Amino acid sequence: MSNSDAKPMVNILGLMTGSSADGLDLCLVNFTGEGRDPDFEVLFSHEIPYPRQFQLCFRNPLELNDEEIAELDNKLGIWFANEINKLDLKIDFIASHGQTIKHEPPHFTLQIGNPQYMAEAIQCPVIYDFRTADLEQGGQGAPLIPIVDQYLLQQDNSDVLALNIGGIANLTIVPGQHNSAPLLAWDTGPGNTLIDKAVRLFSHDILNYDEGGDLAAQGKINHKLLDELLKHEFYQRTPPRSAGQEQFGKTYFQHILKQFNPRNDQEFKDLIHTLTVLTAKTITGSIHTLSTDYSPTAMFVGGGGAFNKMLMNLLRAELPSIDIVEMDLSGVNQSNKEAFGFAYLGYLYINGLTANLPGVTGAGKAVTLGKLYQPQSG
């Protein structure tokens, strides 16, 4: 191939830290080509656990004051830069989601992890603040990954679902190319966030999550509590909708404990079991609301919840006609998909392409997402 035929190539490092506040996911992607459908190759993926200080602060972000947020913004940017520099990767751009502190659409959203410090310390341009432009158009600023689901998963004739179970669970229905129905996506409710809180309380902070769903499997359902939890107003909202710690954080978990105060190990396991059922039922309930315009044959599952065997078994039992599979596509898997997604959103930004889906977020129009910080030369 002559130089004149060569397609543009760019290496983008996607960074993602979710509401579970357990660490940093990185995914370095080489994109080749132009337009919305470039070829890609995953060059590197990695997960780095947060230091204990970050875990404690980011699990209850609504309790932070402005001074603490400003200090954590700098500390997190420094930590990001130090960890990335240790990896010695060839990076053209960094696309950083940042750690969400507050998300109150359509008025306000805040993600921290000082991009200026990162850009200077790594000497690499940083794309950041992916949510504000959508909010400025009246949107929810979330979910942002559905356009990535479309890029990765759209098929000719079959409709497919993409489910990410992080702290919050979110769902995308990607219609086949020959289905004129629109792509839809929304947050279904809590993913791991309530389960994790119960596990940490039960284990006195020795465990951070229910590995494999083993604790939940030892419990039994509390129907009275489940029925009460399912009355939360969030589940009655029609999409577009997004959720966070404002709906399902520490305050809500304390409300649950007032209703069902576990007094021994078995009652704790019953609580963890019931919260796992809640996550499953709110996910499958969302799927059952889909109109007959959609006939999904498969659901690709990513995020930490994909490793919870009990949760996955509950989903399979409720959705017998849908093939539920782990995300594993050309190097994109259940662990790195969201970090890959922000690398792709970074690619859209540098190519001046719109990245939000107004039908998903409720924004008035499609816009480019992100801001760029260029390091000062020398």
Image (spheres, grey):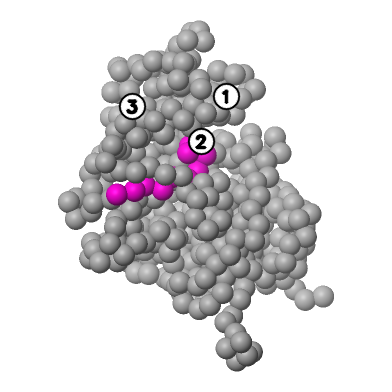
Q: Position of residue 80 (x, y in %)?
A: 70, 53
Q: Position of residue 321 (x, y in %)?
A: 26, 41
Q: Secondary structure at mark 2?
A: helix
Query: Which comes sooner in the sequence, label 2 or label 1?
Result: 1
Q: Residues within 10 Å of mark 2 (few under 14, many from 20)?
A: some
Q: Secondary structure at mark 1?
A: helix
Q: Nearer the viewer, residue 297 or 274?
A: 297
Q: Position of residue 208 (x, y in %)?
A: 59, 29
Q: Nearer the viewer, residue 211 or 263?
A: 211
Q: Residues within 10 Å of mark 3 (few under 14, many from 20)?
A: some
Q: Quadrant of the C terminus?
A: bottom right
What range is drawn magenta here? Answer: 297-306
- Residue 370 to residue 189: above or below: below
* Count of marks placed on residues: 3
Query: Which comes sooner in the sequence, label 3 or label 1?
Result: 1
The residue type indicated by label 1 comes to: Arg
Residue at horizontal 41 percent and vertical 34 percent from the top: 312
The residue type indicated by label 3 comes to: Leu
Q: Is residue 311 magenta?
A: no
Q: Position of residue 258 (x, y in %)?
A: 42, 17
User: Comparing marks 2 and 3, which lies closer to the viewer?
Assistant: 2
Q: In 3D space, how far apart are the residues under numbered discs 3 and 1 (Cα atoms)?
A: 20 Å
Q: Is residue 377 left or right of residue 346?
A: right
**Which label belongs to residue 200?**
1
Residue at horizontal 45 percent and vertical 20 percent from the top: 217
Q: Quadrant of the N terminus?
A: bottom right
Q: Nearer the viewer, residue 126 or 39?
A: 39
Q: In 3D space, how far apart are the residues under numbered discs 2 and 3 (Cα atoms)?
A: 24 Å
| Residue at the disc numbered 2 | 307
User: Comparing marks 2 and 1, which lies closer to the viewer?
Assistant: 2
| Residue at the disc numbered 3 | 229
